Image (cartoon, rainbow, N blue to C red):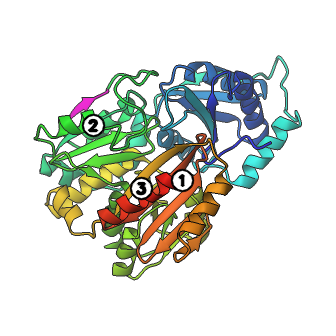
Amino acid sequence: MSLFGTNGIRGILNETLDPELAYKLGMAAGTYFEESEIAIANDSRTSSDLLKQMVAAGIMNAGKNVIDLGLFPTPGLQVYCKTHAIPGVMITASHNPPEFNGLKLVRPDGLHPNKEQESEVERIIMGDLYYKTTWDTVGRIRSEDASEIYIARIHKFIKVAKIRMSRLNVLADLANSVATKTTPALLRSIGVKYTSINGNPDGFFPGRNPEPTEENLQKTINFAKSGGFDLTVAHDGDADRAVFLDENGNFIDGDKVVAIIADHILQSKKGDLVTPVSSSFLIDWVAKNHGVKVHRTKVGAPIVADELEKINGLFGGEENGGVIYPEYLNARDGAFALAMMLDIIASEEQSISKIVGKMPDYKIKRIRIPMNRDFDSIKKELLNKYQDFDKDETDGIKLIKGDKFILARKSGTEPIIRIYISAIDEDWISSRENEIRKII
């Protein structure tokens, strides 16, 4: 059986995620990694402490020491692991609903393991091939605050003085989770005035669902429209993603954020871009303007990161608000995306809406369908309906008409089918949505 999905192990406590698996993963991590220390961190979910203690016990029983970073973002853990050249384990279900939780491994270079490495960890677990310590060599555990290390890393890639001089004002939706630990500290460190909402860690996520979609952010949008904010940021549950609202409270699609940051970086450096098949053709427009190529992958931040590493790419990102800049960290990071957006506003000396307005207005409609039908039958009906479209089976089925597309794929983190419809023309999107809902 395969334990790892698109981005780690996910499930619901004592239904599809047994605490014993967390212990076994800790044992397997302690067995697989050669380093004497392993860092761990967690999000605010109700089951995170339980699972973290199980992971820590497994690591120590394999004879390795544990460094507990506490409530901390996934990319913060990755930066710590990269800085100290040690592996890590993150306890989080990222953007999934509150009942979910999950486990992510981090390599000593700060990256997610590739499929071969995950398979080796699975082999250790399935074969009960753990190293088990003795009473006199059992591992120890200690706590550490890694916030300063994380924020200092981000500072190296932005013009802090320029941002300070711009006297920007930000609304920060911290999603009742790990961003409460780091985003306010980051904003203070670069002289940005801010107002925070959903700022108390709470595993029930009382403010909103942890996935920062436009639908889930309606209260935040209403607050942002009250005025006075140059930018609004909203994180997901483990703060490896960030989505944004402009100064008028209008939602900025994740594709546009990726395009804006890519365009900014490409003004001083050249290199190819990587994005999943779920992203619109806006990134292609940016790439063409700078004379570089776009490489498309299956959906999933680790897959994008793997491709960036493989081709020595410059920058990558996903339409869901994840951006990856390998020179900083070859993994997505919401706080880094926020810092880059503030750097761009300060550098351009323009409002974010004007910066967005310079680009073609590609739109993406996202639809979630419960997995109550066989995906192959849906795929067959879509192919039959859109026979005159070009097709791409990199991930699910993508049907392309010029710079428009329909993508249907099974989620790698939830029991749902995800549908993406993208075009500049809203009527075209609405028509395709009606047709697809009838099919499904």
Q: Which of marks 2 and 1 is nearer the N terminus?
A: 2
Q: Which residue is drawn at 73% across and 25% down?
A: 23
Q: What element carries label 3?
A: helix
Q: Is residue 223 above or below residue 318?
A: above
Q: Which residue is drawn at 65% across and 52% down?
A: 375
Q: In which quarter of the image is residue 66?
A: top right
Q: Distance between the residues labelled 3 and 2?
A: 24 Å
The residue that disc 3 covers is 434
Q: In this view, does 383 lie above or below 133?
A: below
**Residue 91 visible to an observer of this rendering:** yes
Q: Which of 68 and 430 is in front in this view?
A: 430
Q: Position of residue 296 (x, y in %)?
A: 53, 68
Q: Are marks 2 and 1 in contact (CB under 8 Å)?
A: no
Q: Position of residue 389 (x, y in %)?
A: 52, 75
Q: Is residue 427 above or below residue 46?
A: below
Q: What element carries label 1?
A: helix
Would residue 379 appear left or right of 289 to someone viewing this image?
A: right
Residue 301 numbered mark, or none: 1
Q: Nearer the viewer, residue 342 or 228?
A: 228
Residue type at mark 1: give it: Ala
The residue that disc 2 covers is 218
Magenta-colored stretch includes residue 134: no
